[in-house]
Amino acid sequence: MTQDAIAIRGLVKTYPAHAGAPEKQALKGIDLSVPRGSVFGLLGPNGAGKSTLINILAGLVVKSAGSVSIWGFDQDRNPRQSRAAIGVMPQELNLDPFFTTRAALEVQAGLYGVPRAQRRSDEILAMIGLSDKADAYARTLSGGMRRRLLLGKALVHSPQILVLDEPTAGVDIELRQMLWSNIRKLNRAGMTIILTTHYLEEAEEMCDEIAIINQGSLVVRDSTANLLGRLDAKTMVIHPETTPDMLPQGDGITSELRDDGAVALRYQSRSVSAEAVLAAVRAAGITIRDVKTEEADLEDVFLSLTSGAHGI
Ligand SMILES: Nc1ncnc2c1ncn2[C@@H]1O[C@H](COP(=O)(O)OP(=O)(O)OP(=O)(O)O)[C@@H](O)[C@H]1O
Ligand SMILES: [Mg+2]
C-alpha cells in the first residue's frame, strides 16, 4: 500500500441540490490506486467526474464518503502531510489578476509554508518559459501563459505528485509540446504524474496506465499497452489495380468494399495471420496496387467502453 502514490477507496461525491437543480452523484464509489513514479491518465467523457475526483485530491472539494490516501497519508487524519505531497494544476484558470507572475508563485509558496531560502521562483519561471514575464500582471498574460503559470504554481512546494486537469485544452502546438517535455522531465526526475486529457493520442503516448471513468464509476483501469491489446481488431486496406469481381473470403476475415474502391479486411491479429489475409486477397484474383493496415487505437477502446456517452 505504501508503494501507491494515491489510494482511493469507496469514493463518493454527491453535490447537493442547488438553485432548482437536483442533487448530483458525481462519483459513485470509486476504488483506484496510482503507482508511484507513473504517468497516469484519467479519461472519461464530459461530466464523468474527473475534475470532481481531482478536486477532492487537491482538497478543493469535500468528499461525501470513502477514503483518500496521498503518498501514504490519509487525507482526513493527516491533512497537512497529504496536502504537501500533491500539486494540482486546475482545469479552471483561477488566477488573481492583480498579482505579477513572480508574486503569484511567491504567494503560493507562502501558502504552503515554503521558507524563503527554499523558494525556487526563478527556476520555475525559467522552466515554464515566463522569465521575461516575471513582473507582468496575470491579467496581461495570454491564455497559454496563464496555463503555464498555473503549472508553475502547482510546483512551488516541490510535491511528489503532480496532478494536471486538462493541461493542454485549447493551447497551441508549441505550448503543448513544451508542457509535455516539462512533464516528461519531471517524471524522469521521479515525480508521479496524474492527468486528464480529451486528446486520446496524447494519453496513448504519455501515460503508462489509464483509468476510464464514466458517469461517476470506474469503467476500466489497466496499463496503456493492455488496454490497446484488448481491441485486437486489425484492418488491412487493399487498393486493387482493378475493381474486384469478388471480395476475399476466409476464416475470421470480413471484407467490405469502401466508397473509394479500397477493399477493407477486418481480422483479429491474435488468431489470423497477415499472410492468411493476403492469401485470401490473392485467391479472390485481386492484384494489389497499395496496402496499409489500421490498428485499434485508444479512441476505439474508449468508445467501446463508454458507448452511449456523448463527446470525449
Ligand atoms: N459544484 C457543483 N455542483 C453541482 N454539480 C456539479 C458541480 N461540479 C460538478 N458537478 C456535476 O458533477 C458531474 C461531474 O462533473 P466534473 O466536472 O467532475 O466532470 P469532468 O469529468 O471533469 O468533465 P469535463 O470533461 O467536462 O471536464 C457533472 O454532472 C457536473 O454537472
Ligand atoms: Mg473536468
Image (spheres, helix red, strand yellow):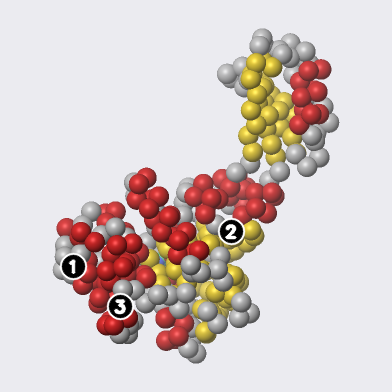
Of residues 263 and 116, the one nearer the viewer is 116
| Secondary structure beneath label 3 | loop
Determine if residue 10 is in view: no
Is label 2 or label 3 in front?
3
- Between residue 187 and residue 145, name the one nearer to us: 187
Residue where numbered disc 1 is placed: 100
Disc 1 crowd, CA 10 A, few/some/many (<14, 14-19, 20+):
some
Q: Which residue is mark 2?
A: 208
Residue 119 tag number: 3
Q: Quadrant of residue 22?
A: bottom left
| Above or below 299: residue 194 | below
Residue 209: assigned label: none
Separation of disc 2 and disc 1 at Cα? 36 Å
Q: Residue 209: in sight, yes or no?
A: yes
108 with respect to 48 (left or right)? left
Residue 39 x/y as whole percent? 53, 62
Which numbered disc, 3 or 1, marks the residue that appears first in the sequence? Answer: 1
Pair 3/1: label in front: 3
